[in-house]
Image (cartoon, rainbow, N blue to C red):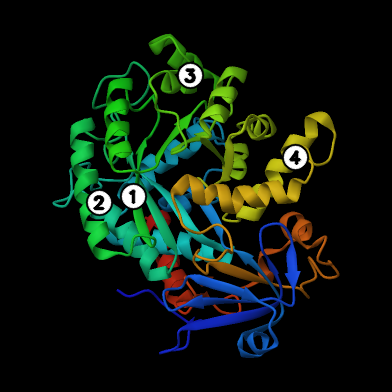
Amino acid sequence: MPAAVVESGVPHGAREGGWLPDCVYTGEKFELGVAFFADALGRITRFSREPADLTSARRLAGQAVLPGLVNTHSHSFQRVLRGRTEQRGRGEPGAGREAQAAVEHRVVARLSGEEVFDVARMAFLEMLLAGVTCVGEFHYLHHQPDGTPWPDANFLSREIIRAAHDVGIRIALLKVAQLRAGFRAEAGSAPARSRTAGAEQFVRELEALRLVVEKEFPADEAWLGAAPDSLAAVPLEAFKAIATYARAQRMRLHTHGATTADESAACLAEFGRTPIALLAEHGLVDKRFTVVDAIHVTDDEVKLLGAARAAVCVCPLSELSAGLAVAPAEKLLAAGAGLALGSDTNTQIDLLAEARLLEYRLRAPGRTRAAIAPDAATAVFHAATVTGARSLGSTGGALEVGRPADFFTVNLADPSIAGADAGSLLANIVFALERRAIRDVWVGARQRLANGRHVSHGPIVGRFVDLQKRLWEA
């Protein structure tokens, strides 16, 4: 099924097309009176103030343009759980990770392949509505509802990629390995729908998927990464085997780590090291490595991550909704680590809300503004764009010559940011923008959202509503 395209920014037969917003964010500031152009491949070719170029470019009156956001960590199928784990009842686990796991096991375990596709489309549509043009999908739902493999072991991975293609968002499919249920647990004890028999099988499946994806999609539209879920789910030797394959294929390596103090203690008990220290000791922490959460990292682990120029993905909305703390982002940045943002469980899909929540959470202990960096708005927006792109191996993340024309526009007259000047606009967008102010979204110079709507908006939402009725009224 082809992607739904509203309009291309490059007229048919033309060598390039362009846009002229009121202002455009070029990485350091908003520029006024600048048009930018892209070629037929959707790559930015130039910026210009020449009168002839300003006249020929498509006018985006009353709008500001920013680079598309990068959602580094998502579990799209968990979108069905929104609002379903916020209560605490008799005999049930407390609200948080345990409650979500219990409901997930009961409900999500029933999802068919077609339903996984429909849920993913809904989540990816919401991402476009929030200005996200690239997503890292941490995909661990692999098998049929009864736990048996599909005839094609990569069937659900391909359905997720198909959903992204249909909606028109770039995707890094981070295929997840889970071999066991926790530290010191027996092999094969992972949940039935996500269980991997071993590292060798996982690598074989990932290699087969790589060949298919590279054949069917442009390299910057859909690509793969390797994701051993955590050291709790993937023992060290299996973790190393998966990482060796990923390094040989120049794939990104993502994993959860130091999410809770108990997990770090269990890792120390089994391996004699805390998670990041153990992985670094075995040469697995480098510039292609991203750890998700990193809430309970030690000061030494912060230094290790910084020295390696590794990335840390934080997901404040999901982490705080589960009763967790937040990573020491300011220490990580100061040490040289990259900071990226993700929507994780998709409790809410709004990367700018993730950014502001992170900064506000860090302000509380010290009762100070700009806790993450002296210029907090620039730092967290960088996390939501440039660092996220680097973490996923994406070519986007910034509006620069040679990069794809992935961008979103905001309505400068929206009440949430009305009156902002060029100097305060980024801070207004990061800390005050309402999602309704996002009007148009372009991916590779193709318009995916026009005036806040996708061309397949109604059918995508309608199918998801029907799915929710089947799941929750059964």
> Helix, strand, or loop for circle 2?
helix
Residue type highlighted by circle 3? Ala
Picture coordinates of residue 130 (x, y %)?
59, 63
> Helix, strand, or loop for circle 1?
strand
> Closest to the observer: 48 or 8?
48
Give the alpha-carbon distance from disc 4 to disc 1, as whole Å: 32 Å
Going from the N terminus, do you reach mark 4 or mark 2 first? 2
The residue at the point 23 percent across, 62 percent down is: 215
**Which label belongs to residue 373?**
4
Residue behind mark 1: 224
Q: Contact (CB < 8 A) between labels 2 and 1?
A: yes
Characterize the local packing of mark 2: few (<14), some (14-19) or many (20 or more) Cα atoms within 10 angstroms.
some
Residue type highlighted by circle 4? Ala
Residue behind mark 3: 277
> Helix, strand, or loop for circle 3?
helix
Q: Is residue 229 above or below residue 377?
A: above
> Helix, strand, or loop for circle 4?
loop
The residue at the point 26 percent across, 58 percent down is: 214
Going from the N terminus, do you reach mark 3 or mark 1 first? 1
Characterize the local packing of mark 4: few (<14), some (14-19) or many (20 or more) Cα atoms within 10 angstroms.
some
Q: Contact (CB < 8 A) between labels 3 and 1?
A: no
Give the alpha-carbon distance from disc 2 to disc 1, as whole Å: 7 Å
Q: Is residue 191 above or below residue 28?
A: above
Give the alpha-carbon distance from disc 3 to disc 2, as whole Å: 30 Å
**Which label belongs to residue 210?**
2
Going from the N terminus, do you reach mark 2 or mark 1 first? 2
The residue at the point 41 percent across, 42 percent down is: 104
Q: Contact (CB < 8 A) between labels 3 and 4?
A: no
